Image (cartoon, rainbow, N blue to C red):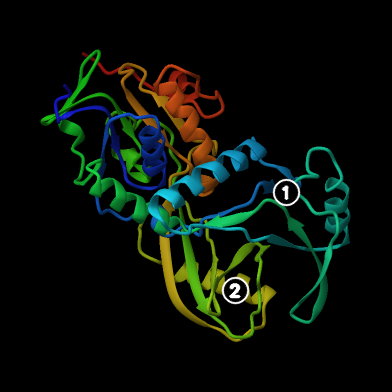
Amino acid sequence: MRNKNDYDYIIVGGGLAGMLIAWELLERGKTFLVYCNNAPASSNVAAGTWNPVTFRKMIPTWRSQEMIDTMLKVYPKAEHKLGIDLLSFIQVEKILSNEQEEQFWEKMAITEESKNFLDPELLDIIIKGENKKSGIVKQTGRIDLPKYVKKSQAYFHKNGHLIFETFDHSVCKPKRTSIQYKSVKTNKIIFAEGTYAEKNPFFDWLPFKPVKGDVLTIESEDLNVNKIRKKNIFILPIGENKYKIGATYHWSDKTWEPSEKAKLELIEKFEKISNCTYKIIDQESGIRPATHDRRPFIGAHPQHKNILIFNGLGSKGVFLGPLLASEFCDFLEYKGEIHPEVSIERCVNKYFKTPRA
């Protein structure tokens, strides 16, 4: 009979990454305990949109179709369990700058690589009285990320899988086959702490490069945008004449408070593509858990193989997370490997220094 304080896994972090792993482990019949604190988190601010195309090259991003296929299995399961709606399928509309960009879109939209993601038929659109063309990205949408995280936390808390408590790294005692944390014993511990991983003594050697982002919420009766419009920023309709406008990318500002500089930047970019009347009703900011090479950090500690990290999902967490969490849980159960593109093995030789005895 299992001791009530013995678990297969401890998960540290109650944001998107931690919740994705928790749902995976629950489905696999594993015992686990999530430690979740009330610190600010990027999951509470993120727009939750996904776009499988990089506009610079007009090609799909890394493993796009696999990501979408997995995502559209994972999130509906959470919707069913929680009894809520999370997903909305809304097109991404890219405003094209000039004739050269229009021709490039049309050329790439009929290639084998991009034909499932780019609509070859361009649309006419008027931007501040000027005739423009826009292209539609297929297989796009949005998940209500703050709702997904908060409702998942409440579900796991109610069912005894999550506690609201700050994890104390200093009393985490790894042994060869188990880990003791206070009165709790576990086989493995997974750190999914977002930007707070920079202060984790087991993984502070990894080259994180967190990036702050601000988002505005505006109200406008004459904007009339019904797609996710993109042109240096995004305009995301959220209903009742309200829109999210974002997002900024600031690497030097590590504060969680919204900044006036970011607000002015977003206003300037927004007013370049819209002359509607509007009022700002909210401004939020978060710090994305990004990395030096824009790839997630996933894998086991070089010395303590039962201490693991699942982090660095950056600004594409809702898109990357479900597939990578599934593959990570396969790895935990010795049923698969971590893809070398996201494995922390790529960083060990250069960044990890063996602690002195």
Q: Amino acid at mark 1?
A: Arg
Nearer to the camera, 322 or 283: 322
Mark 1 vs mark 2: give the one in front.
Answer: 1
Q: Is residue 149 left or right of residue 324?
A: left
Nearer to the camera, 93 or 240: 240
Quadrant the N terminus occupies: top left
Give SS at disc 1.
Answer: loop
Residue 221, position as x, y percentages in the image: 59, 85
Instruction: State yes or no: discs 1 and 2 in contact (Cβ < 8 Å).
Output: no
Q: Which mark is residue 123?
A: none
Query: What residue sits 30% from the left and 18% below the top?
Result: 304
Give the CA separation, mark 1 to mark 2. 22 Å
Query: What residue sits 45% from the left and 32% below the top?
Result: 297
Residue 88 versus residue 283 in the image, above or below: above
Q: Residues within 10 Å of mark 2 (few under 14, many from 20)?
A: few
Q: Amino acid at mark 2?
A: Glu
Query: What residue sits 80% from the left and 54% below the top?
Result: 119
Q: Earlier in the sequence, mark 1 or mark 2?
A: 1
Residue 130, position as x, y percentages in the image: 81, 78
Q: Is residue 293 left or right of residue 276?
A: left
Q: Is residue 33 left or right of residue 328?
A: left
Residue 44 versus residue 351 in the image, above or below: below
Q: Which mark is residue 268?
A: 2
Residue 158, position as x, y percentages in the image: 24, 49
Residue that numbered label 1 is attached to? 56
Give SS at disc 2.
Answer: helix
**Residue that sits furthest to the left in the current view:** 183
Whether residue 253 is visible here, answered yes or no, is no
